[in-house]
Image: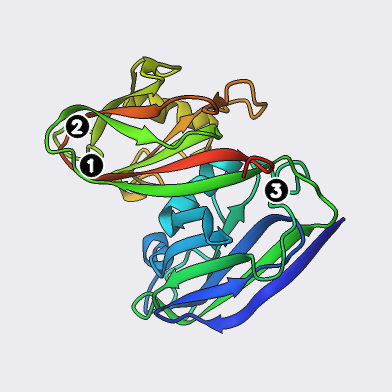
Amino acid sequence: MIRKTNILKGYTTATEVKTIDLPVNPLSHLVISLDGYNVTDEATLAEIIASINKVEVLHEGKSIVSLESEDLYALNCYLFRNQPMLTQNIATDNAFRQLNLIIPFGRHLFDPNECMPATQKGELTLKLDTTAPAAALDNSTLQIDAVELIGATPSHVLKSTVRNIVAPGATGEKDIPLPIGNKYVAILAWLTTFPVTSSHLYGVLGWKLKKDNIEHVLAYFTTQGLIGEMATRLPTMPRDIAAFGQVQPANYVWIDFDPNSNDDFLINSEGAADMSLTCDYGVNEAMRISMIELQSISGG
């Protein structure tokens, strides 16, 4: 049975870190709604989303979800193959705007086999790091809704966690160690540099995946190739004049290990001695990656 429950209603957005206890029943997903009124003209997506700095879901203090809001937006885009809702893209002063972000606990919503299992009271919490968006939205409020799957006994839960990667010190190939023990659905990478003017350089030019120090699935695949494949994940409107600007979400690549959403190509790291992502840096700069994994319920 599905039960939809509000857990935060009409809460005035503030500069704070707010912790909220979540329901004890199995959870398919949470819905974050951030709303407010345009300040003078149209608040951009970047301005609105910046008021949510980080989103975390913790089970007994361990991260199930730990993402910056921009990463959660990109995860919504590529996991659900559609962009999150953003209402009233107009420039009228005081026009009501609303952005919705979904925190998923499975690759497919409402899936009793892949969701957050039942917990004890106080074990599962949502932590929101927010900043009052005074320059972009007036009278901003937050709502949080939960979708429970009563009686579900899932085998896996989707784990989505971010890691900030410091500049390597030089261009060229460098290995980034990855956690082992779960099945990889994807790796979401945000690059500081995407080429804009008079340059072909991406922050990372190409990618390899190594399992037990042997190239695995990704022998070497370019960032351009990954961007091309992302067309299967997110339909985008033609942007053939400059006024349309950058395709959103900007500066992301999705390294896909579940292209057909049928488990055939998931990367199983259980039993591996090590795993790493080899990045061929075109620019000596910081980046961040989000590991999108299926975690076994029994394995914790």
Q: Alpha carbon of mark 3 to alpha carbon of mark 2: how far?
A: 39 Å
Q: Earlier in the sequence, mark 2 or mark 1?
A: 1
Please tell me in which quadrant of the rendered image residue 289 appears. Answer: top left
Q: Earlier in the sequence, mark 3 or mark 1?
A: 3
The quadrant of the rendering that contains the N terminus is bottom right
Amino acid at pointer 3: Cys
| Mark 2 in CB contact with mark 1 (< 8 angstroms) | yes
Please tell me in which quadrant of the rendered image residue 135 appears. Answer: bottom left
Q: Marks 3 and 1: which is nearer the front?
A: 3
Q: Marks 3 and 2: which is nearer the front?
A: 3
Q: Alpha carbon of mark 2 to alpha carbon of mark 1: how far?
A: 7 Å
Indicate left or right for 292 with 208 as reference: right
Q: Alpha carbon of mark 3 to alpha carbon of mark 1: how far?
A: 35 Å
Amino acid at pointer 2: Leu
Which residue sits at x=48%, y=34%?
A: 180
The quadrant of the rendering that contains the C terminus is top right
Please tell me in which quadrant of the rendered image residue 142 appears. Answer: bottom right
Indicate left or right for 199 with 226 as reference: left
Q: How many C-alpha atoms fall within 10 Å of the one at disc 3: few (<14), some, or many (≥20)? A: many
Amino acid at pointer 1: Thr
Query: Element type at marker 2?
Result: loop
Find residue 193 and name its label: 1
Q: Which residue is mark 2?
A: 201
Indicate left or right for 275 with 222 as reference: right
Q: Which residue is mark 3?
A: 115
